[in-house]
Image (cartoon, grey):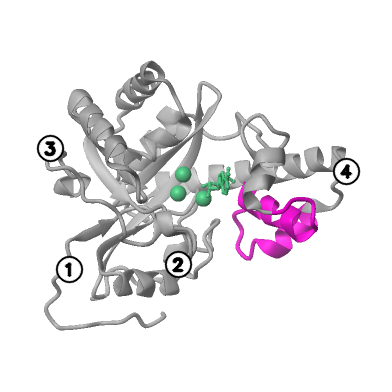
Amino acid sequence: MIALKYTGKKMSYSMIYDLHSHTNFSDGLLDPTVLINRAITMGVGTLAITDHDTISAFKNIDIKNNHSIKIIPGVEFSTSWKKINVHILGLNLQLESAALKEGVNFQKEARSRRAIMIAEKLNDIGFKESLEGVFNIAKNENIGRPHFAQYLVNIGAVKNIDQAFRKYLGAGKPGDIKNLWADLPQIVEWIKEAGGTAVLAHPKKYRLTRTKLKDLLDDFIIAGGQAIEVISGNQNPEITQDLANLCLEKNLLASCGSDFHRPGEVWAELGHIPKLPSSCEPVWNNW
Ligand code: AMP
Ligand code: MN
Ligand code: MN
Ligand code: MN
């Protein structure tokens, strides 16, 4: 077990909640312990670690220990809704849950199959042996498109990660492979069976029309979804207000998180996020 900073006998956590973050067990840069210590430095009182489709980061963390920060076990599941890639956070999970284990195993299989398919597509357009390259970049088991993006940068095929997504990996491009993930109702079921809260991540990132976003929320609610991320990173106040209104309208709880992946991305530093509007009921009131 790796030691974490411990600041006193009687624990009282700061009021800053950051309920969305990534480690190097998915596409984040930092080791879980380094991530937690960075969150402490940033004044975060409650941190959810939510790697893409894996809970492996928790293998090396003793979440029950008296840290100066409260750690919430979480996951960010990938799914698709009407052929659009959508992310569902599971927060406050029981890590020993059989349903959760089944879920991450299913998604891990899907990720492996997808990695092979992406490599085949890249091969077809002239980038040979990307799978081997990607295995060298992704230190842990869970391969994602950002690892392919890094590979394309490394071999000089693109200038940066963003260009890799725009040309080869983003929506509608060869690396955008759909229909491999578990469907939305299944994802929500796994989360709820694990005692967790299902949260629609970053609702504005899907670039849906208002009608479509409401349709997605309705399907999510029918499946048992309970909350949306009203705050995702350092977003502007109009977006926050709009999502807070949707929360009220659809009777959903509200979550907030940085979606931190690595230091240096100023729009997504741990804990550096706006406060939830007072009209919102925070997701943690339920815990
Ligand atoms: P995957 O889960 O493998 O489909 O990869 C999705 C992840 O790629 C997201 O969680 C982001 O971290 C990252 N991502 C998506 N689009 C971009 C982009 N344009 N530039 C950089 N990273 C991106
Ligand atoms: Mn990511
Ligand atoms: Mn996401
Ligand atoms: Mn994320």
The answer to the question of whether label 1 and label 4 lie on touching residues, with beta carbons closer than 8 A, is no
Determine crowd level at label 3: few under 14, some 14-19, many 20+ residues with C-alpha closer than 10 A.
few
Q: In the rendered structure, which disc, 1 or 4, sits on the residue that comes first in sequence?
A: 1
Which is more foreground, mark 1 or mark 4? 4
On the image, numbered disc 1 is attached to which residue?
13
Give me the C-alpha separation between circle 1 and circle 3. 23 Å
Q: Range of the magenta residues?
A: 131-159
Determine crowd level at label 4: few under 14, some 14-19, many 20+ residues with C-alpha closer than 10 A.
few
Give me the C-alpha separation between circle 4 and circle 3. 53 Å
Give me the C-alpha separation between circle 1 and circle 4. 52 Å
Give me the C-alpha separation between circle 2 and circle 1. 23 Å
The answer to the question of whether label 2 and label 1 lie on touching residues, with beta carbons closer than 8 A, is no
- The answer, for residue 78, to whether it is visible in the render is yes
Residue 252, image quadrant: top left
Who is closer to the viewer here, 89 or 234? 234
Q: In the rendered structure, which disc, 2 or 3, sits on the residue that comes first in sequence?
A: 2
Give me the disc on residue 126: 4
Which is more foreground, mark 2 or mark 3? 3
In the rendered image, which quarter contains the N terminus? bottom left
* SS for dot 4: loop
Which is more foreground, mark 4 or mark 2? 4
Give me the disc on residue 279: 3
Give me the C-alpha separation between circle 2 and circle 3. 37 Å
Residue 136 painted magenta: yes
